[in-house]
Image (tube, grey):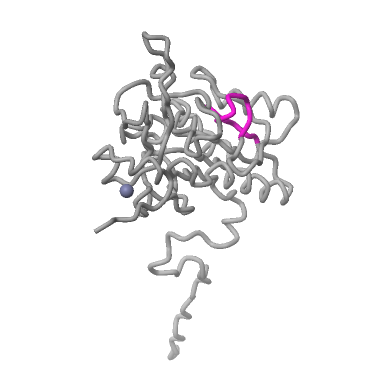
Amino acid sequence: MCRVLEPVPVIREARDPREDRGALSSVPAAGNRRATPMPAQLKFFHGPMDCGKSTLALQIDHNHARQGRHGMLLVRYDRSGGAAITTRVGLARAAIELGDDTDIRLLVREHWAAGRAVDYLIVDEAGFLTAAHVDQLAELADDSHVDVYCFGLATDFRTELLPGAKRLFELADETVPVHVEVLCWCGRPGRLNARVVDGRVVREGDTVVVADTLAADHGTAGGTGAGGGDDAASATGVEPEVHYQVLCRTHHRRGDLGTAAGRGQLALELP
Ligand SMILES: [Zn+2]
């Protein structure tokens, strides 16, 4: 008797094509991506005063609201001194003002508890936030899928990072310079906010000012210019003139405001 040995059939296991992506193996399949919500983002838009940050804040709010998303507007110190996001081009929206002790997480949860959706946050004057505020925003983005858009100055009138900006640079998913160019009187891009008291650039004093300290006839005045009210009170009872002016780094360093007539304009160099 002779048996013909039949070849052992090779059993090929059906392979999941998703297992065979080589270098792309860490990328989840499209189907999985749908099961996992898109992670929310914490973004920081920064620039000197007058560069249009608040206008951009309201534009982003408008764009999201138009898509049916629900936002909450928050502000630290607005130039109007009230609970609103106001812009130099005349737009304004009511906003919730944040104090030192405000827990933004609780604020959002209170809204949810009242049955109102919060899909995103717009935070203006975010440079003046505390580090704790920014930590709370990061937690809301990570754990609650709330998109957070922060707008503010990066540095104060001493050219040092503001506390909220510092923490945002450390934690934000994205930091974006706002590119509406503000020019120094010399024509170079203005990057820094100078506090000017009685015609001189000062580098000491309180970091924070609550609102515009000057009437609008000082075209460069700005409460958002990281200035301080203390300079305005002098022992003689005469109020010094305080305003804020955007300068390039060179002229901020030198304390050079250009000619009085040329403030905010290009100065002509005479031979
Ligand atoms: Zn300059």
Q: Is residue 127 visible?
A: yes
Q: Please say if 60 is above or below 2.
A: above
Q: Position of residue 210 (x, y in %)?
A: 51, 23
Residue 42 relative to residue 263: left or right: right
Q: Is residue 76 visible?
A: no
Along the line of sight, the residue nearer the viewer: 69 or 95: 95
| Segment colored magenta | 72-85
Along the line of sight, the residue nearer the viewer: 32 or 183: 183
- Determine if the magenta segment contains residue 177: no
Q: Position of residue 234 (x, y in %)?
A: 38, 12
Q: Quadrant of residue 270?
A: bottom left
Residue 67 relative to residue 181: left or right: right
Q: Position of residue 152 (x, y in %)?
A: 47, 38
Which image quarter is the C terminus in?
Answer: bottom left
Q: Which residue does the image show at 49% across and 33% down from the upper left?
A: 222
Count of numbered labels shown in the rendering: 0
Q: Position of residue 203 (x, y in %)?
A: 29, 28
